[in-house]
Amino acid sequence: MNIVPLTSESMADLRIERANFVKDMIHNQEGVLLVLGGAFAGENRQHQTVSYAVTSIFYELYERYTFDFWTYTFDAEGLMYYIRINESPESIKNTMVHYEDYHPLGFAIQSHVYTSDKKWTRDLLNAKERVDFYHNMTIDKLLNKDISDKKYEEAFIKKVENEIIKTDKQSVLSNILIYGYISAFTKPLGFGMYGPNQRGSNKQMNYKNFILLLRTYKNEMKNILHVNSKSYEDIRSFQKDIEKKIQLAVLTQESFYFSVHMTSLILFAFMNSTGYADISPQIKKLGDEFYEKHKNEEDSARYDITRTGLKEVFNFYVPFLQKNKNVVSTMLYILSRYDDVSISSKNGEQNLLKIQFLAKNLIFKEDKWIELEKFSVSHALNPHDSTILLADTLMLDLIQRNYIKIKMIFD
């Protein structure tokens, strides 16, 4: 079941519309409907750090409960998960109160628990009213507002990022990976790539499968410290094993090796590095070792960028993201500069040149982005490789800004 994103004149009206929609959704249904979303009241509630926090909690709940059904929306209120569970509503509400009040990312999420006859509130459990960490205002009142305070936005983002890196060796690498992927794929437009509101040109994949893909990848990351980070054979075996498990999780034979290779390579290079500037040479070392294997594979040109140490990413993509702080415009910047093999091999060089030209001219013209989205879909373009490089860019941005803190966990 796909839910159409909700729209309304104001955030308060949108939240009322969602509450009424959810009541209809659970009407005459057994079990509990849990609605999980972000607790950020800034202008851009679709910000990647909010999506990261909400999805991280979603994964924890996925491990804790058996979901009868789940789906999602991505609208002006941000990423929302709708989860049906056959459990006691009181127990689930207690769990969510505990998450919101005590989990390190609890400040960043909101949750609502419904049964067919009522909404389960904190009052029913005699739980204290929840107050925002920054504005000292109750969350329900705060989320009805549109807060344009940049200091609040910066504080929220920083608080989430601190939780990404404030953990153990295995978890910090997994967190960086999830952050990169969620940020790259959970955006308003994909320009032919699937997303929460786009079907995309790849009929084998969609956003729901992506969430399952990433959960599998996340769980396998706990084994990364058992891999020799300087051994081509060990890394290759690790990557191929992850690909097989992803294929089982999403029930497809489609290859996921490129995406696993390009993202895990950054983490292996980070582990081998002596400083942020050393990550690129470490990627080049591994890229050169992998070249002999990849050169005989179909679309081998897509791996050539690793033999430069992802120089283009380090020198141009990361600085662009840090200057403009916009994931969608960064995606267009990458599309405008990168010879995306996933486009050229399936759609031809002419279509690649067209999307590069259009992306270059529309990087900062947000009002024209929807037209570029329509162009990409009508031409069946699937900028898969550019999207993976966007994930790499987001991971490296986070690593650069927190390199010493992260490296201290390992040292």
Image (cartoon, rainbow, N blue to C red):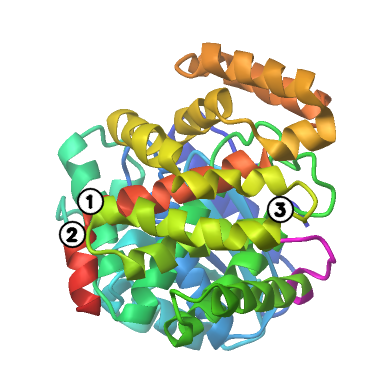
The residue at which mark 3 appears reads as: 295
Q: Secondary structure at mark 2?
A: loop
**Observer-nearest of 5 and 222:** 222
Image coords of residue 38 (percent x, y): 41, 55
User: What residue would you read off at disc 1?
Assistant: 401
Q: Nearer the viewer, mark 1 or mark 3?
A: 3
* Left or right placement of residue 65 versus residue 256 in this view: left
Task: Check the image and report above or below for 355 versus 305.
Answer: above
Name the spot of residue 224 as percent of width and height, x first.
Answer: 47, 80
Q: Answer whether residue 57 is magenta in the image.
A: no
Cα separation, mark 2 vs mark 3, equals: 52 Å
Q: Nearer the viewer, mark 2 or mark 1?
A: 1
Q: From which residue to which does the magenta span run?
A: 248-256
Q: Is residue 105 left or right of residue 205?
A: left
Mark 1, secondary structure of its residue: helix
Q: Are marks 2 and 3 in contact (CB under 8 Å)?
A: no
Task: Name the N-terminal-most of marks 2 and 3.
Answer: 2
